Amino acid sequence: MARSRAPLWADRDAIQSLGPMGVALLDAAAGGFLVAAIAVAARRRGGRARSQRVRALGWVMVAGPLPVAVMLHLLLPLPPSVDQAAFLAGVAAFAVGAALVLGREEDNWSESEEEPSPPWWPAFERDLHDYERERAKGTVTR
């Protein structure tokens, strides 16, 4: 029997687990993303803690979708594409939930309600109103 000169990695028939291996790599990448998202959310300091409602939503997102996806995988014979989609959706929900639980709100995200006007503003408004009055009378000189 003559051996093919193509490298083993190029012969798709030689590796029967190429499809599952790609899924395993995708799962590993999703896990790495999850760890990175949690680390970033945990390292963010400053600001005030999120509201109790937002934190509760975060806990539901952490405790719900990913364990449900794992239970579906263990208990039901799902098609591989549905199983993979459920797992990735669970990982994404877990990452968002962890960010909500561990993250903090920015203190300076909005302007204060009543800012003092700049010191030059009253004089500018007065000159603008004078100009508008003169323009309405037709006495503006250029």
Image (cartoon, grey):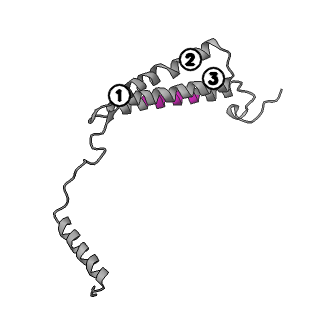
How dense is the environment of label 2, judged by Cα within 10 Å: few (below 14), some, or many (20 and up)? some
In depth, the one of 9 and 62 nearer the eye is 62
Q: CA distance from mark 1 to mark 3?
A: 28 Å
Quadrant containing the C terminus in the rendered view: bottom left
Task: Report helix, strand or loop for mark 3.
Answer: helix
Q: Identify the amino acid type marked 1.
A: Leu
In depth, the one of 61 and 80 nearer the eye is 61
Can residue 31 be found in the magenta stretch? yes
Q: Position of residue 131 (x, y in %)?
A: 26, 78
Which residue lies at the image location 27% right of the left edge and 87% below the top edge?
A: 141
Which tag, 1 or 2, sits closer to the chain's start?
2
Residue 27 lies left or right of residue 108; in this view the side is right
Which residue lies at the image location 25% right of the left edge and 73% below the top edge?
A: 129
Task: Report helix, strand or loop for mark 1.
Answer: helix
Q: Identify the amino acid type marked 3.
A: Asp
In the rendered image, which residue does mark 2 sit on? 70
How dense is the environment of label 1, judged by Cα within 10 Å: few (below 14), some, or many (20 and up)? many
Indicate whether 139 appears above or below 26.
Answer: below
Q: Identify the amino acid type marked 2.
A: Val
The residues colored magenta run 25-36
Count of all numbered marks drawn on residues in the image: 3
State the mark number for residue 4: none
Q: Position of residue 94 (x, y in %)?
A: 47, 26
Which tag, 2 or 3, sits closer to the chain's start?
2
In the rendered image, which residue does mark 1 sit on? 102
Residue contact at pointers 2 and 3, CB within 8 angstroms: no
Q: Position of residue 130 (x, y in %)?
A: 23, 76
The quadrant in which residue 133 appears is bottom left
Residue 5 lies left or right of residue 112; in this view the side is right
In the rendered image, which residue does mark 3 sit on? 83
Quadrant containing the N terminus in the rendered view: top right
